[in-house]
Image (cartoon, rainbow, N blue to C red):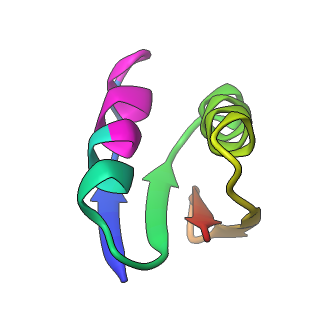
């Protein structure tokens, strides 16, 4: 599983990193973010590209897994 650590980054950087990871990944991508609006943006991007997401809060950050 490819992992994108976008914790502490400002928009649109987490989204740009997510898009790049999805292009090169051949399986699920895990995106780590710190802000709820970043989680929402990543989930919307994934949905717009036909992907499913699951998310969970862990140790002060949010994990979004895109499949």
Q: Is residue 17 above or below residue 52?
A: above
Q: Position of residue 59 (x, y in %)?
A: 56, 70
Residue 50, relative to residue 38: is it above or below?
A: below
Q: Nearer the viewer, residue 24 or 44?
A: 24
What residue range appears in magenta?
10-19
Residue 7 appears anywhere in the view = no
Residue 36: x and y in percent read 71, 35
> Is 17 within the magenta?
yes
Q: Quadrant of the C terminus?
A: bottom right
Assess whether residue 5 is covered by the magenta stretch: no
Q: Is residue 34 left or right of residue 4?
A: right
Q: Please tell me how many numbered marks the rendered image carries.
A: 0
- Measured from the top left, where is residue 49 in percent x and y? 63, 41
* Magenta-drawn stretch, dominant element (helix, strand or loop): helix
The answer to whether 62 is drawn above or below residue 13 in the figure is: below
Question: Can I make out residue 26 in this image?
Answer: yes
Relative height, residue 2 to residue 16 (above, below): below
Q: Could you tell me residue 9's position as x and y percent?
A: 33, 29
Whether residue 30 sits left or right of residue 67 in the image: it is: left
Seen at 64% across and 45% down, the residue is 46
Q: Quadrant of the N terminus?
A: bottom left
Give whichever of 60, 41 is nearer the camera. 41
Please give left or right for residue 48 compared with residue 26 in the image.
right
Q: Which quarter of the picture shows residue 8?
A: top left
The foreground one among 43 and 6 is 43
The picture quadrant where one finds residue 55 is bottom right
Q: Residue at x 48, y 76 (%)?
A: 28
Residue found 53% across the figure and 43% down from its top: 34
């Amino acid at each position: 599983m490819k992992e994108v650590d976008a914790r502490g980054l400002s928009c649109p950087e987490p989204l740009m990193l997510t898009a790049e990871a999805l292009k090169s990944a051949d399986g699920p991508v895990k995106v780590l973010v710190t802000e709820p609006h970043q989680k929402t943006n990543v989930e919307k991007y994934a949905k717009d590209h036909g992907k499913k997401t699951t998310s969970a809060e862990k140790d002060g950050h949010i994990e979004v897994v895109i499949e």
